[in-house]
Image (cartoon, grey):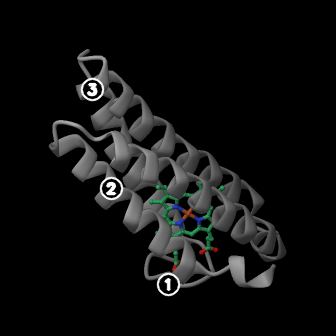
Amino acid sequence: MDFLASTHLHITTWVLAIILFLVALAIANPKVVHMILRVDYILIIITGIALFIKGMDYGQGMLYGLKFIAGILVIGMMEMTLVKKKKEKPYTTFLVLAFVFFFIALFLGFKLPMGINFLA
Ligand code: HEM
């Protein structure tokens, strides 16, 4: 299952998630888009865990742990935003938090040693 520990595959899955999330936010009936987005969450998590396991060789467990948490929180906040929107409740807080955790995940991902690391 080594092919799963690919930063390119991981990037593809979360870029797709951001696009699906923004579309789901913009359209009136995002039922199907939301469903596809949920499948994509699984792909983000699978590739993320594969990278995490491989990452344990680099001796930066603390930062990898924070990256893991930040990634999960992005997914959590996207999901909360869409569920609140569906129930016609206020969702701005979750939307803002989704972007805050997104930038934290982006920063840590680009800082950590695998793949692209222009922030290292
Ligand atoms: C939407 C949420 C997420 C975003 C925006 C995101 C973003 C990124 C980025 C930008 C990278 C760097 C890619 C590269 O260097 O080429 C990365 C790598 C990584 N991500 Fe994520 N990620 C997310 C979710 C997750 C989740 C849920 C996990 C864990 C289950 C995870 C674990 C990892 C690991 C371990 C790496 C490798 C770090 C390295 O050594 O470069 N990510 N991610």
Q: What residue type is disc 2 on?
A: Leu
Is 5 placed left or right of 73 in the picture?
right
Quadrant of the drawing holding the N terminus: bottom right
Which amino acid is tagged 1?
A: Ile
* Image quarter of residue 62: bottom right
Residue indicated by mark 1? 116
- Give the alpha-carbon distance from disc 2 to disc 3, as whole Å: 15 Å
- Does residue 76 sit above or below 99 in this rendering? above
Label 3 Cα neighbours within 10 Å, binned few <14 / some 14-19 / many ≥20: some
In the picture provided, is 89 more to the left or to the right than 116?
Answer: left
**Residue 40 has which mark?**
none
Secondary structure under the numbered disc 1 in the rendered image? loop
* Residue type at the position of mark 3: Lys
In the picture of the structure, the residue carrying the numbered disc 2 is: 20
- Please state which of the two labelled residues, at mark 3 or mark 1, is closer to the viewer: 3
In percent of the image, x 55 and y 78: which residue is there? Answer: 9
Q: Is 17 above or below relative to 51?
A: above
State which tag comes first along the sequence, 2 or 3: 2
Assess mark 1: CB under 8 A from ligand 1?
Answer: yes
Check disc 3 and report the residue beneath it.
85
> In the image, ligand 1 is in what quadrant?
bottom right
Residues 32 and 12: in front is 32
Q: Earlier in the sequence, mark 3 or mark 1?
A: 3
1 or 2: mark nearer the eye: 2
Mark 2 residue crowding within 10 angstroms, few (<14) / some (14–19) / many (20+): many
